[in-house]
C-alpha cells in the first residue's frame, strides 16, 4: 500500500516546481493618469497575486467607501506620499507567479524628473510595459519611456493601450495607435515590440479576454508576459567570467569565484586571463552542491585552473578566440543620477563587473533631450540628464559594447567622497584606436611633446596634488585605508628600509608621480623630518602622538588631504 507524501515532502516538491519556472523581470512606465498603477493592481488581483489582507485593506479605503469599487492602484502605491499626490514617486518591486512563470515587476515613476528611477528599475528588465492613454495617443513621455527602454537594451517592449472604454472600444483607434507605436519602436531599434488594447479598470484583456473587443485576436497582457521569450536569440555568446573572489581554503585548492556574465564554460576549456593574457585550461567547475561538467550565463561558480597563474578580484577569464575589448578610453551613454552635476575632469570611481578603477569624463559629446530625442551641446549634466560622453579610466576595462552584452557593457560611477552612485553608463565603443591614429599622423616633435606628461596632468588624473603625511605607527595603516577608500592615490613608505640620506630623493620621485606618501614618525630622525618638511612645503603634514580617538585623528588626516584635492582643481594649469 502506497504511503501518502508528508506535508514536508509536498511543500518541498512545490518549492522545487516553483524554482524551475522561468523568471521574467519587467518594468512599467506611463505618463500621469495613464492608469499604470491601476493596471498593475488589476494584473495582480486577477492573477491571484494579492493576499487577502491586502485586498481587505484596499476595500476599506475612503475611496472605495464612496464609490463601492475597488481602487486597484492602491495595491501598488504603498507610500502615503504617493497616495496624497496621486502619483508614483519611487521604484516599487512586486512579485507574483502563475502556473507558467514567475514575475518581478519594477513599478517605476513616469515623470521626467524621475528618469533616474526608471533607469534603475529597467536596468535588469527583460521586458518593458509602456502605457498609452487611448484618449491622448502617443505623448512626449511615451517617446521618452521608449527611448530609455531602447537605451538600456530591454529586448521586449509591449505597449498597453489603456482606457479603451473611453473611446468606445474602437478598433480604428487601436489600429492607429498601434501603427504609431510600432513606427516609433522601429526608429529606436527596439528588437521586439507588441501592442495590447486594455481597460485596466474593467479588466479587459489584462488577464481575461475582453468581450468588448471581439475584433482583437491577440494575447491578453498576462498571456503575452507568460509566453514572451525571456532572452531574445543572439549571436553573442563568448564566455566572460569576471573574478569576484579568490578562494584558497588550504594548499590543495585554489579557485576563482564569480558569476558567469556571458556564454558558458566547461571543464577542459581553454581560457585566457585578462589583463595578463596568460592561457590555461579549466580543471574543474565547483559549486556548493558539487562539481559540474559545464555552467552557463547567470550561474555562480568557482573555477579551478590547471596552471598556477596570478589572478585577483576584478580580472576576467574569457574565451581565447573571442576576447573582449580592452581599453581605458571609450564612449558611453550616461544617465546622471546625482543632485550635484557632472564635473568634466573630476575623478570618480567606475565599477564595472567586479573591477573598480578611477575614471574621468573628459568630454561631453552631446546631451539627449529625452522628450524629442534631439542632440544638444552641453558643458555639464544635471540629475536625470542623459548624455553621450568620453570616459578615461586609470586602468583598462575588459568590455563588450552594451548592445552586445548588458553585463560587460555597463558600469556605474561612484563619488569617492560620499560613496553615492552618481551615474549609470552604457559603453558604446572603444576610442583608443582613434587616439592612436590621430597621433600617428603628427610630426615626431609634436608626438614627443604630446607624450611628455606634465605634473598638472598627473594631479588632475589623480584628482589631488601630492603630499607627505608623517603619522604615528598606531594609525598609519588605518589612515592609508581611509585615504584610499576616499579616492586618493597613496603609498605607505617603509622609512626604516631607506637610508636617511636617500629618503628625500625617493620622496621627490614619488611626489612627481602625484602620490600621497605616508611615513611612520618613529622611522624618522628630527633632522630627516625637517629636511622633508623643507622639501615638501605646504604639502607636509605631521601628526604627533595624540590623546584624540583614532576616529578623530583619521578624520583630520582625510580633511587635510582634501586640501590637496582642492588645490588640484584645473584653475591655471601653467601654475604647476
Image: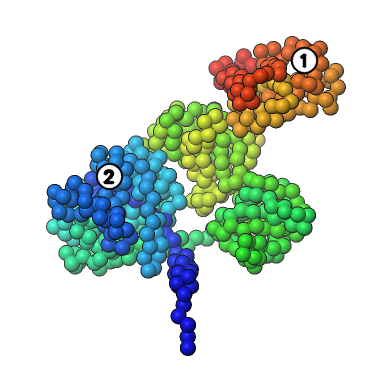
Is residue 273 found left or right of 235 in the rendered image? Answer: right
Q: Position of residue 438 (x, y in %)?
A: 60, 35
Quickly name the residue at label 1.
529
Q: How is the image coloured?
A: rainbow
Please tell me whether mark 2 or mark 1 is closer to you in this view: 1
In the picture, the quarter occupied by the C terminus is: top right
What residue sits 72% from the left and 22% below the top? Answer: 472
Q: Position of residue 42 (x, y in %)?
A: 26, 57
Is residue 420 found left or right of 70 in the rendered image? Answer: right
Q: Secondary structure at mark 2?
A: loop
- Relative to 218, is 6 above or below? below
Is residue 189 found left or right of 550 in the rendered image? Answer: left
Q: Position of residue 429 (x, y in %)?
A: 54, 44
What residue sits 44% from the left and 29% below the top? Answer: 341
Q: Secondary structure at mark 1?
A: helix
Q: Nearer the viewer, residue 391 or 479?
A: 479
- The answer to which quarter of the image holds residue 96 is bottom left
Is residue 375 at all visible to an observer of this figure?
no
Mark number displayed over residue 343: none
**Is label 2 in contact with label 1 (beta carbons under 8 Å)?**
no
Quickly name the residue at label 2.
31
Is residue 158 at all visible to an observer of this figure?
yes
Q: Nearer the viewer, residue 373 or 483?
A: 483
Quick one: label 2 or label 1, which is nearer the N terminus? 2
Q: How many marks?
A: 2
What residue sits 60% from the left and 40% below the top? Answer: 356
- Relative to 546, is 276 above or below? below
Q: Position of residue 313 (x, y in %)?
A: 65, 46
Q: Label 2, label 1: how many angstroms apart (C-alpha)?
A: 66 Å
Is residue 176 found left or right of 25 in the rendered image? Answer: left
What residue sits 39% from the left and 50% below the top? Answer: 93
Amino acid at each position: 500500500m502506497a504511503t501518502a507524501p508528508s506535508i514536508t515532502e509536498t511543500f518541498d516538491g512545490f518549492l522545487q516546481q516553483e524554482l524551475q519556472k522561468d523568471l521574467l523581470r519587467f518594468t512599467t512606465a506611463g505618463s500621469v493618469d495613464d492608469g499604470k498603477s491601476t493596471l498593475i493592481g488589476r494584473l495582480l488581483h486577477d492573477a491571484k497575486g494579492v493576499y487577502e489582507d491586502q485586498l481587505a485593506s484596499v476595500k476599506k479605503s475612503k475611496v472605495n467607501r464612496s464609490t463601492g469599487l475597488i481602487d486597484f492602484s492602491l495595491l501598488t502605491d504603498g507610500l502615503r506620499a504617493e497616495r496624497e499626490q496621486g502619483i508614483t514617486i519611487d521604484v516599487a518591486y512586486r512579485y507574483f507567479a502563475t502556473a507558467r512563470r514567475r514575475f518581478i515587476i519594477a513599478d517605476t515613476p513616469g515623470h521626467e524628473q524621475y528618469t533616474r528611477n526608471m533607469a534603475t528599475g529597467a536596468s535588469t528588465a527583460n521586458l518593458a510595459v509602456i502605457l498609452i492613454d487611448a484618449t491622448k495617443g502617443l505623448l512626449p513621455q511615451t517617446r521618452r519611456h521608449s527611448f530609455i527602454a531602447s537605451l538600456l537594451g530591454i529586448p521586449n517592449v509591449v505597449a498597453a493601450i489603456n482606457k479603451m472604454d473611453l473611446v468606445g472600444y474602437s478598433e480604428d483607434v487601436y489600429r492607429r495607435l498601434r501603427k504609431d507605436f510600432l513606427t516609433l519602436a522601429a526608429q529606436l531599434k527596439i528588437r521586439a515590440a507588441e501592442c495590447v488594447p486594455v481597460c485596466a479598470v474593467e479588466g479587459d484583456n489584462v488577464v481575461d479576454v475582453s468581450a468588448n473587443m471581439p475584433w482583437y485576436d491577440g494575447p491578453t497582457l498576462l498571456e503575452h508576459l507568460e509566453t514572451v521569450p525571456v532572452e531574445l536569440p543572439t549571436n553573442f555568446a563568448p564566455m566572460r567570467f569576471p573574478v569576484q573572489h579568490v578562494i584558497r581554503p588550504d594548499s590543495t585548492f585554489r579557485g576563482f569565484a564569480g558569476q558567469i556574465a556571458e556564454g558558458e564554460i566547461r571543464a577542459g576549456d581553454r581560457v585566457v586571463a585578462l589583463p595578463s593574457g596568460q592561457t590555461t585550461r579549466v580543471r574543474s567547475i565547483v559549486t556548493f552542491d558539487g562539481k559540474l561538467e559545464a555552467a552557463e550565463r547567470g550561474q555562480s561558480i568557482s573555477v579551478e585552473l590547471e596552471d598556477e597563474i596570478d589572478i585577483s578580484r576584478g580580472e576576467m577569464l574569457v574565451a581565447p578566440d573571442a576576447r573582449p575589448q580592452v581599453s581605458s578610453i571609450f564612449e558611453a551613454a550616461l544617465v546622471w543620477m546625482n543632485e550635484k552635476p557632472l564635473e568634466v575632469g573630476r575623478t570618480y570611481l567606475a565599477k564595472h563587473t567586479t573591477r573598480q578603477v578611477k575614471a574621468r569624463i573628459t568630454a561631453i559629446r552631446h546631451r539627449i533631450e529625452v522628450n524629442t530625442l534631439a542632440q544638444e551641446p552641453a558643458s555639464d549634466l544635471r540629475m536625470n540628464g542623459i548624455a553621450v560622453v568620453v570616459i578615461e579610466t586609470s586602468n583598462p576595462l575588459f568590455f563588450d559594447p552594451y548592445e552586445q552584452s548588458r553585463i560587460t557593457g555597463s558600469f556605474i560611477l561612484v563619488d569617492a567622497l560620499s560613496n553615492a552612485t552618481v551615474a549609470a553608463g552604457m559603453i558604446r565603443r572603444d576610442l583608443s584606436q582613434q587616439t592612436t591614429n590621430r597621433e600617428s599622423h603628427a610630426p615626431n616633435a609634436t608626438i614627443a611633446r604630446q607624450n611628455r606628461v606634465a605634473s598638472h596632468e598627473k594631479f588632475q588624473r589623480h584628482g589631488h596634488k601630492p603630499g607627505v603625511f608623517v603619522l604615528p605607527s598606531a594609525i598609519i595603516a588605518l589612515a592609508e585605508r581611509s585615504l584610499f577608500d576616499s579616492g586618493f592615490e597613496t603609498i605607505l613608505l617603509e622609512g626604516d628600509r631607506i637610508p636617511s640620506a636617500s629618503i628625500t630623493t625617493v620622496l621627490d620621485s614619488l611626489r612627481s608621480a602625484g602620490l600621497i606618501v605616508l611615513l611612520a614618525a618613529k622611522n624618522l630622525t628630527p633632522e630627516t623630518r625637517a629636511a622633508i618638511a623643507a622639501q615638501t612645503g605646504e604639502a607636509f603634514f605631521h601628526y604627533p602622538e595624540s590623546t584624540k580617538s583614532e576616529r578623530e585623528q583619521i578624520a583630520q588626516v582625510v580633511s587635510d588631504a582634501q586640501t590637496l584635492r582642492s588645490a588640484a582643481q584645473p584653475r591655471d594649469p601653467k601654475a604647476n
